[in-house]
Image (cartoon, rainbow, N blue to C red):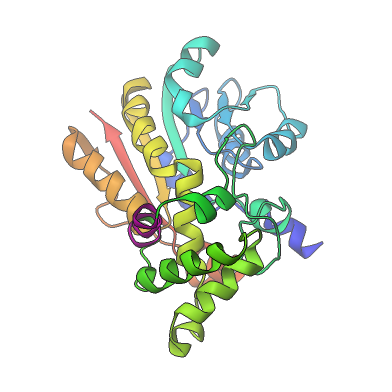
Amino acid sequence: MKEKSRVHIPVLKQEVLHLLNPKKNENFVDCTAGAGGHSLALLEKNRPNGKVLALEWDSNLYNILESKKRERLIVCNESYTMLEEIVEEKEFGPISGIIFDLGFSSFHIEKSGRGFSFRRNEPLDMRYNKNILLTAKEVVNQYREKDLLYIIRKWGEEEYADRIVENIIKERKERLIKNTKDLVKIIEKSVPSSYRNRRIHCATKTFQGIRIAVNGEIMNFKSALPQSLKILKKGGRLAVITFHGIEERALLDFIDKNDVDLLTKEPVKPGALEINKNIRSRSAKLRVIIKK
């Protein structure tokens, strides 16, 4: 039962509500709705006529969200790369605030069976949406060495990427790397023992890089940011929760290139109490910008 409850914990919920500052009858968009934590919290604050447009790309999470549907909650099983088109199609607006929570849901680790977790032995899949053709198995077994190196070093920010990729190439010449357990074993033998014994698992960054590659996460995020700014009303707020350096740099680059006000001079981070309740929130950073 405890495991199930973690699926629904929205990161930095109170901070998001404080900084987006929803008022009655205002409309909001949750671009990464998951099981609806942020969406439902906003819906409580924008009564009686305010609406929330909730986008969720994963069909399983969408079904969970759909089961919680409220009168003023509009749920869409779509990627936020389609944000502007969806808003136009739904005739949704004016929009006072938008939220992106770029962390992947605990559902993906605990319930999906798609190989997001290095602690479970599951097929190498890592797709948020099953309509994606590319899987983690194809990335690991078919990508060229230099492309695999780029993914793990650049998007995974893994310092031992060279050794890991070298051993992946050796292993896949002998047999197909099919599941997470196979990949974890390769990673563990590729890094020093001191690295294996850290608080953060030695496979974390490699899995991160491959997951980003499979789902096109950075490109998708970069394409959604200008759409968000375009559909926001003047004075509207855009809140983004990032979890690693690649996302953070993409956001900061967008802020630098656009004439916006940064409400959070320093990123807002979860406190010790939240981290204790939800360890996966520890790397979260919230920034909020205001459209001029």
Q: Position of residue 96 (x, y in %)?
A: 41, 27
Give the main secondary structure of the magenta stretch. helix
- Residue 180 seen: yes
Q: Position of residue 42 (x, y in %)?
A: 56, 36
Q: Which of the 4 image quadrants contains residue 116? A: bottom right
Q: Which residues are magenta?
A: 145-154
Q: Residue furthest bottom?
A: 194
Image quadrant for the N terminus? bottom right
77 shown above or below 41: above
Is residue 282 covered in magenta?
no
For the point 74% across and 53% down, the residue is 111
For the point 34% across and 36% down, the residue is 222
Q: Position of residue 225 (x, y in %)?
A: 34, 33
Q: Which of the 4 image quadrants contains residue 152? A: bottom left
Q: Is residue 290 left or right of residue 46?
A: left
For the point 62% across and 63% down, the residue is 175
Image quadrant for the C terminus? top left
285 shown above or below 171: above
Q: Position of residue 219 (x, y in %)?
A: 37, 38
